[in-house]
Amino acid sequence: MSVITGVTRGGTEWTPAFISALNPTNCIGCGRCFKVCPRDVFELVDRETMDDDQDCDEDYGDDDDGFSDDTSMVMSLMNALDCIGCQACSRVCPKKCLSHEAADAAA
């Protein structure tokens, strides 16, 4: 099966890689991905809310990142299906929290 490919104005083919995951354990809530995303894929949420939503049993308080669990914010995937595969979010993420993958072309 083939993957989705695009063509630049110069005629060069490229393969978009769409967001597949966001690692909240590494996320520091800096908002860089949110600011650079042209499609509103991300939203900033309380880390506690993220834990409740994903039933995480990990203890985020021991990672010594300088953030308090009570006030720490993290990014969440709000509209992952709106991702256009530009990977700008990964290029600006200082903690490398984001994973991308190519998608199969529709039959």
Image (cartoon, grey):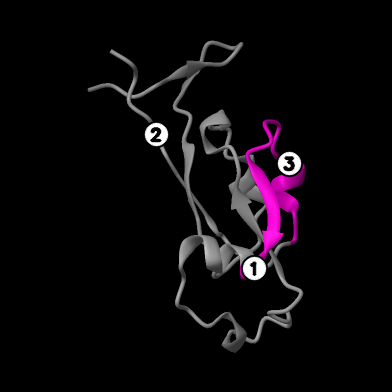
Q: What residue type is labelled 3?
A: Val
Q: Which amino acid does label 1 sit on?
A: Arg
Label 2 vs 3, first from the N-terminus: 3
Q: What is the span of residues highlighted in magenta in the rendered image?
A: 30-48
Residue 82 placed where, x, y %? 57, 30
Is disc 3 in contact with disc 1, using a CB cutoff of under 8 Å? no
Label 1 sits on residue: 47
Which quarter shows the C terminus? top left
Q: Tell me the tag on residue 36.
A: 3
Is disc 1 in contact with disc 2, using a CB cutoff of under 8 Å? no
Residue 83 placed where, x, y %? 56, 32
* SS state under label 1: helix
Depth-wise, is mark 3 or mark 1 nearer the camera? 1
Name the quadrant containing residue 68.
bottom right
Q: Tell me the tag on residue 102.
A: 2
Name the residue rendered at 75%, 54% in the picture: 31
| Residue closer to the observer: 101 or 48 | 48
Depth-wise, is mark 1 or mark 2 nearer the camera? 1
* SS state under label 2: loop
